[in-house]
Amino acid sequence: MPILNIHLVSGQHDPAKVDALLKRCSESFAAGLCCPIDRVRVFVTEHAPRHYCVGGQLVSETGMTAPYFSFIVLDDRPLVVRQKLLSAFTDHIVELLGAPRERVRGGIMPVAAADWSIGGQAASLLRQTEIEARR
């Protein structure tokens, strides 16, 4: 279930560093949620500089780096765990991509287990034992 999407401007970052970011975030996600890594999905979505605006200015005009990420987790995950993930993903972006910390933004999208599908079935049914154990 855990899904992370990191939005970057195309051409601003070394592809090898983006690869390392994907792997590091995957590992942090699995460790932070105490879940098997095979459940984790991490994506980078790249946007053309003329399709990315920061502070009212097009990145194509300024060259500014300002990554944004969001992640989806089941809403029963403890707040402290979710906040640690916000911090870890920010740290990875800053460390691996060299983005200024003050420009990195991120958010959490909690989803009810009944509203999430795994192979076409509600997570609330498939992961009922795990969900109850977290309560």
Image: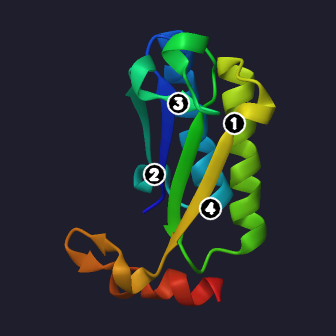
Indicate which disc, 2 or 4, sits on the residue closer to the N terminus: 4
Q: Which circle's residue, 1 or 4, is located before the other in the chain?
A: 4
Instruction: Report the residue marked by disc 4.
Output: 33
Where is 2 relative to 58, above or below? below
Among numbered discs 3 and 2, the one appearing first in the sequence: 2
Residue of label 2: 40
Q: Report if the CB atoms under discs 3 and 1 are less than 8 Å apart.
A: no
Q: Few, some or many C-alpha atoms within 10 Å of disc 2 (few <14, some 14-19, many ≥20)? A: some
Percent coordinates x, y for residue 101 in the rendering: 79, 31
Per the model, the C-alpha gap separating discs 1 and 2 is 22 Å
User: Where is residue 108 shown, x and y percent of the image?
Assistant: 59, 61
Q: Residue furthest front?
A: 56
Q: Disc 3 versus disc 2: distance between alpha carbons?
A: 29 Å
Circle 4 SS class: helix
Task: Say which of marks 3 and 1 sits in front.
Answer: 3
Secondary structure, mark 1, is: loop
Q: CA distance from mark 3 to mark 1?
A: 14 Å
Q: Depth-wise, is mark 1 or mark 4 nearer the camera?
A: 1
Q: Is residue 130 visible?
A: yes
Location of mark 3 (residue): 53
Mark 1 touches mark 2? (CB < 8 Å): no
Instruction: Decide which of 96, 108 is in the foreground and name it.
Output: 108
Amino acid carrying label 3: it is: Cys
Mark 3 Cα-neighbour bin, 10 Å: few <14, some 14–19, many ≥20 = some
Judging from the image, what secondary structure is the residue with disc 2 in?
loop
Residue 13 makes an appearance in the image:
no
1 vs 48: above or below = below
50 left or right, relative to 36: left
